[in-house]
Amino acid sequence: MRQFYDTFATPLGDFSVALDANGSVIATAFGGLAELRERFAADEVVHDPTRAAAARCEVGEYFAGTRQQFTLKLASSGTPFQQSVWAALQQIPFGETHSYGQLATQLGNPSASRAVGRANGTNPICLIVPCHRVIGSDGSLTGFAFGEDLKRRLLEHEGALQAV
């Protein structure tokens, strides 16, 4: 199946987005094509900045401080449980954080915080589906595929953490 991607600069380094033939975002990654390919399966990936223009625009607005919520069409692949967690992530407001336990409770299963953590960790659409807004119950910045420093910088950008 042919899919499309683009990589572009952000204040936190390169960011890549993959889209399906319908223009829906299927994966994102901080880094280039190699990091992006780790997050989705495709037979063929074609560089196409035109198809990714809306994603590039919205991510640029996010980093410029003029966008707090993304409106891109998404088409991530995952189990029904993963999909429910990823939908819950999109409900966490800009500038706020939730713990894994809070998300588990929100999903109706307070004892599922580890399962929520696993689903959060497999989110293929980072930033746009804001898995960086989930923290440990003790406030620790755990569980971000692109590292604690990048997670901290995203949360500082959103005003959810004070810059250190």
Image (cartoon, rainbow, N blue to C red):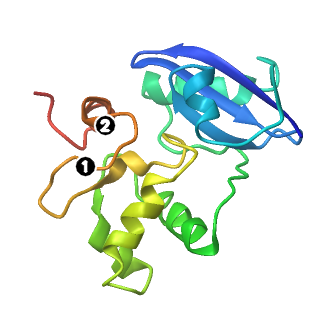
> Is 84 drawn above or below residue 155 in the view shown?
below
> Is 44 drawn above or below residue 130 in the view shown?
above
Residue 33 lies in what quarter of the image?
top right
**Position in image of residue 123 (x %, y %):** 52, 52
**Position in image of residue 32 (x %, y %):** 57, 19
**Position in image of residue 94 (x %, y %):** 39, 47
Q: Is residue 161 left or right of residue 131?
A: left
Query: Disc number at residue 18?
Result: none
- Circle 2: element type: helix
Residue 161 lies in what quarter of the image?
top left
Q: Residue at x 33, y 70 (%)?
A: 114
Q: Farthest front residue?
A: 43
Q: Which residue is mark 1?
A: 142
Q: Residue at x 41, y 58 (%)?
A: 92
Q: Quadrant of the N terminus?
A: top right
**Camera-side residue: 60 or 15?**
15
Q: Residue at x 43, y 53 (%)?
A: 121
- For badge 2, the amino acid type reads Lys
Q: Which residue is mark 2?
A: 151
| CA neighbours of label 1 inside 10 A, class few (<14), some (14 to 19), many (20+) | some
> Is 82 drawn above or below residue 74 in the view shown?
below
**Position in image of residue 124 (x %, y %):** 57, 46
Q: Residue at x 73, y 47 (%)?
A: 73
